[in-house]
Structure formats: structure tokens, C-alpha cells
Amino acid sequence: MKALFEPNSIAVVGASAEERKIGHIMFRNLIASGFKGELYPINPKASEILGHKAYPTLTAVPQPIDMAIITVPSTFVPSVMEDAGKKGIKDVIIITAGFKELGKEGAHLEKQIGEIGKKYGIRILGPNCMGIINAHHNMNATFTNIYPKAGPVAISSQSGAVCSSLLDWATKSKVGFSKFISTGNKVDIDEADLLTYLKDDEQTKVIGMYIEGANRGKAFMRSALKTSREKPIIVLKSGRTSCGSKAASSHTGALSGSDKVYDAAFRQSGIMRVNTIDEMFDLLQVFANMPLPRGDGLAIVTNAGGHGVMAADACSDYGLTLAQFSKETIDKLKANLPGEANIYNPVDVLGDATAARYEFAIKTVMEDPNVSCIAVLLSPLDTVDIGAVAHLVSSFAGQVPIPIVAAFVGGHKTSKGIDLLREANIPNYESPDKAIRALGAMVRYKKMREELNDSIILTVEGDKERVRQVLDNVLAQGRTSLSESEGKDILKAYGVSVPAEVTAKTADEAAKAAAKIGFPVVLKIDSPDIAHKSDVGGVVVGAASEEAVRNDFELMMSRVASRVPGAKLNGVTICQMVKGKEVLVGMTRDEQFGPVITFGLGGVFVEIMKDVSQRIAPLTHYNVDSMIKSIKSYTILTGARGGKMADIPSLKEALVRISQIAIDFPEISELEVNPVMVGDEGKGCYAVDALVTIRRMN
Ligand code: ACO
């Protein structure tokens, strides 16, 4: 895509002499941005546009053309694309709207231009986009005249409105852009392509993206993972995929709405997700201008106790710790600051602090080995010379080994100081909390990058033939839901332990089976038509004698028959009673990202508690480890309140085995094991239930 970002020659098809037209504005912007290459206006009615000789068609231009920008109405776009192909142009930006966003007809036209692009090997940006800015190439190939200064931030946006806001923000905050890309409808070039390109773009230090959805989930993850190891990617995502919770029939389905799938995808590929545009701005500023911190210890230097306390409070919210100063630092601060100053962290240089006092405190804490980042806070007290402090903080720009950010908190009085900080590329935040959030994001990114080094996919071999038999048999019977025992057969074929069990058709058979397994036992209704057995009285735990088993059998059969009339009842399964902590392991399949594995505390309240984590299969060791540790009730597994440590290694293995089933059998659309009973350390874990739904594959 080099020719898209760094073309030597550009043709604008539809360049017009009429000032109000987009084709005119695009051409004018290219000239105004100082584009150094050749420019060709293409317009059959004009002989010259803005001092450049015009040509009737692309093919009429005698010289080679690297990139074409199309600004003619949608119906003419296919023929212009054909011309571009014949001319040998390899990159095209289509500004024109009126494609899939308008419905069926537009979608058809969009498909047509995509096919023409493929036929000629043309990469297409858009349609329905604003274009591209490469500030390092003097190229404003958009129809906005907001042209940011050159710098380290690359931005892409699916929405034109967000594009404009980002550009306007960049101008105000003096943040420099390396590339600015409006992706539009993404008929060809999408975020996965852009990330691959930006990874090796030397002018880009940090990437910000606004997306509404990824077209190619897996490709997006792969490309993001490679890129995020090199530079931070900050994503603001809105919109939904079609994999909604409504259609799901299991707890797992209800718990893994599309947005959570994006959360998992982002986490696994090292993307930092933000929820608002201003959070995106805040993070871009710090990543663009500051080095990464060496650890998580924060030093706060403030002229107001209140702001210092607020910043200290925010530390734990954003993964920072208040650095413990060394004795040397404390002695030095004590000897040189007034007796009333707080010399411990936050360092309070007092209301009458001069710039020199700030300077001394900042330089002293910066030398402390326990300090990894610094927040300089300022309240606009009458006693402070805001300009002098801003000059001082600005003097650290580009000179510091650790990040330093400011929060000059106020509005009117602080504005001049803030302007100075902006000119110097020192990130300034409107509140202490936001300053700490930005520094916390840097710490998070650094940790995440280390964790992403674990990229070895965990795999296991299962008995594929056995699973295939089970699935074929179910499909042959015209079913899409498996019975519990069929589900467990699949789990067993992949090495997941299940409790000993026998399905009994009569009360006598049930009593005999229980005696063989050993008391106490669990009774569970066996029916392919019932997903949640306990909801319909289909589970009895702890039957301790043959007589109890007989009674429970009879009662359960009649109870379930009356509660779910018409359900096919195969009998009752008599199960070995296993002990342990109940967790849930499930899988749903997302249209974009594939199998999504859900883990959480199990049992019937799982949907209420919503204490679950998700990862997209296949899983790495780090994915498995982090998905177990990230649930709120993790300490229950590690022996909270005098409990015993659960067998976490065997739980990890079960997660990997279940994820392998999902990978090997795409026809399994949902799978849920609830509960997986995790025994104490060394005692293994058992899949106590299994809910499997399949779909026909063409
Ligand atoms: N080759 C060369 N020139 C051509 C051709 C052709 N095949 N066909 C037409 N032209 C010329 C026209 O003669 C005209 O030139 P003129 O002014 O000298 O007569 C010029 O191309 C433009 O054609 P018009 O028919 O005048 O079209 P207009 O400029 O009104 O609209 C546009 C074209 C801008 C592409 C319009 O169809 C459109 O899509 N507008 C919306 C764009 C948009 O919003 N994109 C998304 C941005 S992202 C966001 O949301 C902010």
C-alpha cells in the first residue's frame, strides 16, 4: 500500500472547477498541502483545473499514475475503476457515497467495484470515505482543510464524523499526525491491512482507531497482535455483530454478547480499548510524546493537597502504585523544601511554590529508582506563576527517561500555561484522575506487551473419529441438540474426565446402577429436549440408598413429564457424586472471530453473577491463565476463607481440551459444561453436565 500513502503522482477523477464540489476541494487540498508529485485532474469537460492540465479520462494521461482519487457519482465509479485498471493504477481512494450504506442496490454496486479491483489487483480505500492524509508526505488527500502538523500519531476511522473530530482535536492540542485514514465502507482495505502497514511505518509511534466492527475478525487479531508488540494500538469501538445473546440457548450464549467478544479479541491481541473519544485523545497524547515507564511507581508533585489526594486515589483504579521514596530522596526533599511541605508521596510543594521549588522536587523524585512516572499537578492559586511552572515542565520535553505528565487544573487562568505545555508536547490533563489514567495505560501496555510474548498455541489430540460418529448420528436423526450422554461422549473422546454414570430406564435399573457406582449418587433426567435440568426439577443430589434412588426416579419422571409436556424422556442418569468447586466452561461461535471460550464460576446463578471471562480459541498458556485469574471469584478457587486450593492445572487442561473440540468441529455451534467440578489440588476435575448444540455445515 506504499503508493496509497506515498504516491509520486495522483489523479483526481471528477476534479471540478466549481469550488463547492468535493472533486474541486480534494484537488485544492492536495495543492495546498504542498504535495510534491504530479497532479492530474480528470474531467471530460475541463481543459485545466487550478492551473493543472486536465484529461478526459485516466487512460488519456500519458504519464504513469500511482494513485487515483474518485469523486464522481456512484453510477460512474465502475467504469472509472475499469479505466484505472487499464491504466495500471494500483491504489484507489473512492470518496463517493451511495453504496452498501444505502441498501441492496448500493451493496450490489459496491460488490461490483470490489470485483473490478480484484481483477486488476487494485487496492481500494473506501468507498464512502474522506480519504487519507500523510503529513510526512505533504499530502492532504481528503476534502477537509484541517491539516494537522506532522507527528507520530496514526489514526484511522470508519466514521467521517469521528474523523473530523479527531482532526480538529489534533489541531487544538497540537498533536502531530503521521497518517490519517478514513476507511469508509471497507470494500477492500480494512483495519487488518492498515495495522500491517502501520507496524512498519517509521513515522508512526502510536495508532488510534475508531471502528464499528471488524470485517475479518481473525485477520484483524493476527495483524493487531504483531503490531501491538511494536507500538500501542488504542481502539474506540462501537456497533455490534450479529452474534447476539438473544439467539443463544445456553448460559454461555447469554453471557458472551458480541461486545464481550470484541473485548476478548482486543485483549488477546494487545489492543487497548477505550470507551470515549476524550479517553482516546488522552492516551494518544501520552503515548505519542513520552517514553514507556520502567515500572508502576508514580511520583506526584503538587502545589495543592486536594489534587494530590485525588491523584493518589486514582492510582489503584488505573494499575499504578504510589512510589515509596528512598531514604536519600526523602532526606534531600526534607533538607531543601520548607518545613510545612509534605516530603512523602504526593510531594506537596505548597501553595506559594515557585517554579524553582517545583523544579527541585521534580528532579529529585525523577532520580529515585522507585519512581517510574511523574504527574505534576497545579492549582491556579494567586501565589503561583503558572507561566513559569509551565516553562519549567516544558523544559523536560524529550529530555526525560520516564514519562512526565501535567494536570494544570482549572480553566481560564491555566489556559496560557496549558498552551505552553502543548507547544512543548507535554501531555496535560484537565483533572488529576485523567493524568493518572493516561500513565496507567502506559503501565498496562508495557505489561501486556511482555505477556503477549507468549504466543505458543496450546493444542491436544482427541479421538476425532469417535466425535464424528456421535455428531453424524445426531444429524442423521434430524436433531441439532445432543443429549447429555452424547455430549459427554464428545468430552471423553477429548480426554475430559466425566463422572461414572449409567442411564436407567426403570427405578430398579436405577437402584442397581447406584449400588454399583457407590452411594451417594446424583440423579439427572436424560432428555435431548431439556437444556437446564435443574430448572424443571430434573436433578436430585445425594441419594444415599437403593430405596431413595427408586423413589427419586419415580418422582422425577412424573415431575418432569408434567413440567415439560411433550419432552422426550430417555430415563434418568445415575451419576457418581463428585466433590469440588463448581465452574462453567462454555463455547459459542462468533461470526467474525470463531470459537469464543467462556469461563466463570458455575452453578445455576451464573447468569445473575455474570462473573465470567472470555477468550477466543485457540488459546495460549497466557490466555488460559489470565482467563481463570481474571474472574472476581478467583480467590474461591485458590482457597479463600480457609478452603482448599482447587486443582487449577487440571482445570486449565479441561479448558484447552474443550477449546480444541471447538476448533476441530466447526459444526458445534454451542457447548457448555456447567458445572465442571474442580476437585482439591491433585484430585482432577470432572465435567458433570454437557450441553451441546450443532448446526448443519454445507
Ligand atoms: N470522469 C471524470 N469526470 C467525471 C466523470 C467521469 N467519468 N463523470 C462525471 N465527472 C465530472 C462531472 O462532470 C463533474 O465535473 P464538473 O463540475 O466540471 O461538471 C465532476 O465530475 C463531479 O461530478 P458531479 O456529477 O457534479 O458530482 P458531484 O460533485 O455533485 O458529486 C460526489 C460527486 C461528491 C462523489 C457525490 O456523488 C457523493 O458521493 N457525495 C458524498 C461524498 C461523501 O460524503 N463521502 C463520504 C465521506 S465520509 C463522511 O461521512 C464525512
Image (tube, rainbow, N blue to C red):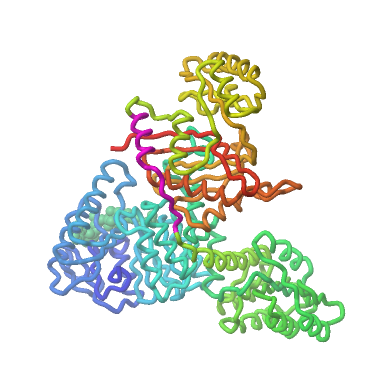
Q: Is residue 213 above or below residue 417?
A: above
**In which quarter of the view is residue 158 placed?**
bottom left
**Which residue is at a point 51% across and 52% down the rendered structure image?**
263
Locate the C terminus and report the quarter of the image it occupies.
top left
Magenta residues: mostly which secondary structure?
A: helix
Residue 648 locus on image (x, y percent): 60, 50
* Residue shown at 54% from the left, 40% from the top: 255
Residue 687 vs residue 263, the one in the foreground: 687
Tally the marks.
Answer: 0
Left or right of 56? Residue 244 is: right
Q: Which residues are magenta?
A: 457-475
Residue 466 among magenta residues: yes
Please provide percent x and percent y for residue 379. Answer: 73, 71
Residue 247 in view, yes or no = no
In-front residue for pair 61/444:
444
| Residue 230 in the figure: left or right of residue 343 | left
Q: Is residue 462 magenta?
A: yes
